[in-house]
Image (cartoon, rainbow, N blue to C red):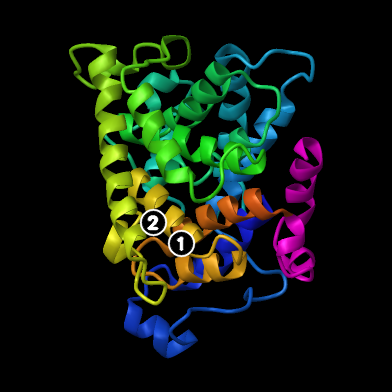
Amino acid sequence: MFGLAYGDALGKDTEFLDMRRIAERYGPDGPRELPGDPALVTDDTQMGLAVGEGLLDAPGDASLTPELIEPLWRRRFIDWARSPDNNRAPGNTCMRAIGGLAEGHPWVEATVHDSKGCGANMRVTPVGLVPGLTDEQRSGAAQLQAALTHGHPTGLAASELTAYAVWWLRRDLVTPKELPSALRERCRVRRTVYHERWLGELWRRAGADSPEEFIARGWDECLDALDRLEAALRAPDPAADPCAATGEGWVAEEALATALLCFLMFPDDPVAAIRRGAASSGDSDSIACLAGAFAGAHLGMDAWPAEWAERIEYADRLARLGRAWD
């Protein structure tokens, strides 16, 4: 969680800069230090906290179900949308969908059905940290938290892959080198698995002929993005703009692939990974925040500069989530 916030804060000021302007301002490797005291984050971290705190709101002895968690996430999302801290240029998709949730509409009506923006998976990290979930629960929860605002199947699939990357790295179930292949295999195995209990009739509203056809579109687009990641990793260029290889990150599958590229070029240097994400031509804060989540899951808290934990915004809330699941 701290890694997510560190990457978010580092990429916040570079999000709309091209590579020339980033190099002029920060040097070719991007920003080195968290800006400010406190170092402010964006809606990426704020919504990650909303997802995590919604999970903590659930009764400790209750099994995670969509009936339990959906109203908790709905409440947390609405509270975030109405908060005075929601002044960090939040995404239009999130605000539009949460507006519908606040009006009391069923989420399958409120969600933006054609959006696969990175808002779907920039916030899913907590789902990858909760221990004790079954595969069905982790997969269903990762997709549901995305579907509340982003109804496109690629946002759902990319969110599941992001959550599983965090889970596998945190539990040492795969090495960084093995991660791309493991994610590609999950795309293949899960290609036609539709979580009807978690997603209801979302597939019908997208105009698909079947739930299997609906969800397969998302897995196929994610697999294409992972193909580009694999190609980039065959001859990685740590000095180049990562977006040139795997996409600018405005959509969910590109945010996943480009963040993984930044992490996998520097698997043992988390600061270098988020600097590379911040020094990119696309959605720099979302790319860097996901790279930070992967690096933090893999390396743990001690790998980061110690004083950053005292300066990052929402440090107390991040620490609460970390203590709950560490």
- Who's the residue at 62% across and 76% down the image? 35
Say whether marks 1 and 2 touch (CB < 8 Å): yes
Specify the principal SS of the magenta part: helix
**Residue position for label 1:** 262
Quadrant of the rendered structure where residue 187 is?
top left
Looking at the rendered image, the quarter that the C terminus falls into is: top right
Work out whether 161 lies above or below 284.
Answer: above
Q: CA distance from mark 1 to mark 2?
A: 6 Å
**Residue position for label 2:** 258
Inspect the magenta stretch and tell me whether residue 306 lies in it.
yes
Q: Give the SS element for disc 2.
A: helix
- Who's the residue at 73% across and 68% down the image? 308
Q: Residues within 10 Å of mark 2 (few under 14, many from 20)?
A: many
Residue 262 seen anywhere in this rendered image of the structure: yes
Q: Residue 231 at what x, y percent from top left? A: 28, 55
- Who's the residue at 73% across and 70% down the image? 305
Q: Residue 176 at what x, y percent from top left? A: 53, 50
- Indicate the amino acid at tag 1: Cys
Quadrant of the rendered structure where residue 53 is?
top right
- Indicate the amino acid at tag 2: Thr
Q: Residue 264 at what x, y percent from top left? A: 48, 58
The residue nearer to you, when weighing 111 against 239, is: 239
Work out whether 204 lies above or below 174.
Answer: above
326 relative to 32 in the view: left or right: right
- Who's the residue at 45% across and 53% down the image? 260
Q: Which residues are magenta?
A: 301-326
